[in-house]
Image (cartoon, rainbow, N blue to C red):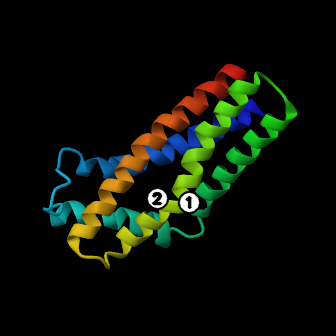
């Protein structure tokens, strides 16, 4: 099971890496009252429009991998393989970003991709997505390390 979970984590890290290639355009640009430059918003929004709404059915693969990751981690938690503390830590490291992505990050990305909001709202969405992805990258990387150590 640890090998499958490590592979899932690697896949999710790759997805996050691609997202971050666009998200980093907001770094170093204040979150003040001024919206991001139009070319930055256009670049990030176009990416999220493609990957969240125009890439169907391939965009569902990310959700499937998230489900396999969470489900496999829950199975590992109840099967009793390894330290209980490490099993709980694994669940937190994958569960928190998966739930947060479903509840907040993906809806924000869909909304940003629609470009329906004014530039200041789009800028806030872009900053929030970037913050989420940076945090998720760290937690999924830590989850991957735990799975590789268990393997």
Q: Residue drawn at (17%, 50%), measured in percent from left and top?
A: 29
Left or right of 55, for residue 149: right
Locate residue 40: give its quadrant: bottom left
| Whether label 1 touches label 2, CB < 8 Å | yes
The residue to which callout 2 is attached is 105
In this rendered view, identify the residue nearer to me: 86 or 6.
86
Residue on which disc 1 sits = 102
Residue placed at 72% from the left, 30% from the top? 87
Separation of marks 1 and 2 at Cα, in angstroms: 6 Å
Q: Is residue 31 left or right of residue 139?
A: left
Q: Quadrant of residue 58?
A: bottom right
At 42% from the left and 65% from the top, the residue drawn is: 108
Does 108 sit left or right of 119 as displayed?
right
SS state under label 1:
helix
Image quadrant containing the C terminus: top right
Q: Position of residue 4 (x, y in %)?
A: 72, 37
Dot 2: what SS? helix
Quadrant where the image shows the N terminus = top right
Q: Residues within 10 Å of mark 1 (few under 14, many from 20)?
A: few
* Whether residue 75 is situated above or below residue 23 in the rendered picture: above
């Amino acid at each position: 099971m640890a090998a499958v979970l490590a592979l899932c984590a690697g896949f999710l890290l790759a997805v996050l890496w691609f997202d971050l290639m666009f998200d980093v355009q907001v770094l170093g640009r204040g979150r003040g009252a001024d919206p991001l430059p139009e070319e930055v918003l256009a670049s990030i929004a176009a990416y999220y429009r493609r990957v969240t709404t125009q890439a169907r059915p391939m965009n569902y693969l990310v959700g499937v991998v998230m489900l396999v990751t969470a489900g496999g981690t829950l199975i590992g938690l109840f099967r009793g393989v390894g330290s209980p503390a490490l099993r709980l830590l694994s669940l937190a490291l994958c569960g928190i970003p998966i739930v947060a992505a479903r509840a907040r990050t993906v809806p924000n990305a869909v909304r940003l991709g629609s470009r329906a909001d004014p530039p200041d709202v789009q800028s806030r969405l872009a900053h929030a997505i970037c913050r989420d992805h940076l945090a998720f990258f760290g937690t999924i990387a830590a989850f991957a390390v735990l799975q590789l150590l268990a393997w």
